[in-house]
Each structure stands twice: as C-alpha cells, then as structure tokens.
Image: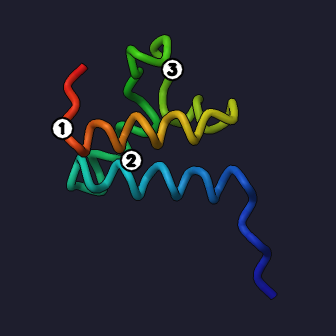
C-alpha cells in the first residue's frame, strides 16, 4: 500500500511544476529549487519557502515570471 504524499511533497510538486515551465530543464529547476536564493523572498531558496509554508506566494511569483514580469 502506497502512503499519501505529505503536504510538503504536494507543495514541492506544485512549485517544481511551475518552475519547469520557466526553466525548461529538470536539472536546472531542481538545482534552482534547492540552491538558488530568491531576492524578493529575503534570499531564501524555494525549498526553504515551501518548508516555511509560503508555497502560494512562491507560486504567484513564478506565475508572474512566466507571464513576463521582470520586476
């Protein structure tokens, strides 16, 4: 029997799906998720933001990037 994914796993998947549209490469977006600080979020990584419960704000940010917002 397979366990249900945790909330963190679901949120991580949502962020990675959004990042894939922007980055295009699985390697790039996984590296970005774990290692790249995001200046508009006080230089926290996406991984840190998901762990802190800020998934929705991060997804809104990614959608704005995908739509062409440059800040």
* Alpha-carbon span between mark 2 and mark 1: 21 Å
- The answer to which of marks 2 and 1 sits earlier in the sequence is 2
**Residue at label 3?**
44
Q: Residues within 10 Å of mark 2 (few under 14, many from 20)?
A: some
Report the residue at 27% width, 45% height from top.
28
- The answer to which of marks 3 and 1 sits earlier in the sequence is 3
**Is 32 above or below relative to 71?**
below
**Residue at label 2?**
30
**Is 35 above or below relative to 11?**
above
The percent coordinates of residue 3 (x first, y second) are 79, 75
The percent coordinates of residue 58 (x first, y second) are 49, 36
Which mark is nearer the camera, 2 or 1? 1
**Is 71 above or below relative to 49?**
above
Element type at mark 3 = loop
Which mark is nearer the camera, 3 or 1? 1
The percent coordinates of residue 64 (x first, y second) are 31, 37
Image check: 25 left or right of 29?
A: left
Element type at mark 2 = helix
**Residue at label 1?**
68
Report the residue at 35% width, 48% height from top.
19
Quarter of the rendering occupied by the N terminus:
bottom right
Image check: 40 left or right of 6?
A: left
């Amino acid at each position: 029997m397979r366990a249900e994914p945790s909330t963190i796993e679901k949120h991580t998947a949502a962020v990675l799906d959004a990042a894939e549209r922007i980055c295009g490469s699985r390697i790039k977006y996984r590296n970005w998720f774990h290692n790249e600080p995001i200046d508009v979020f006080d230089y926290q990584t996406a991984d840190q933001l998901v762990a802190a419960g800020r998934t929705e704000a991060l997804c809104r940010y990614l959608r704005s990037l995908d739509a062409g917002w440059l800040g």
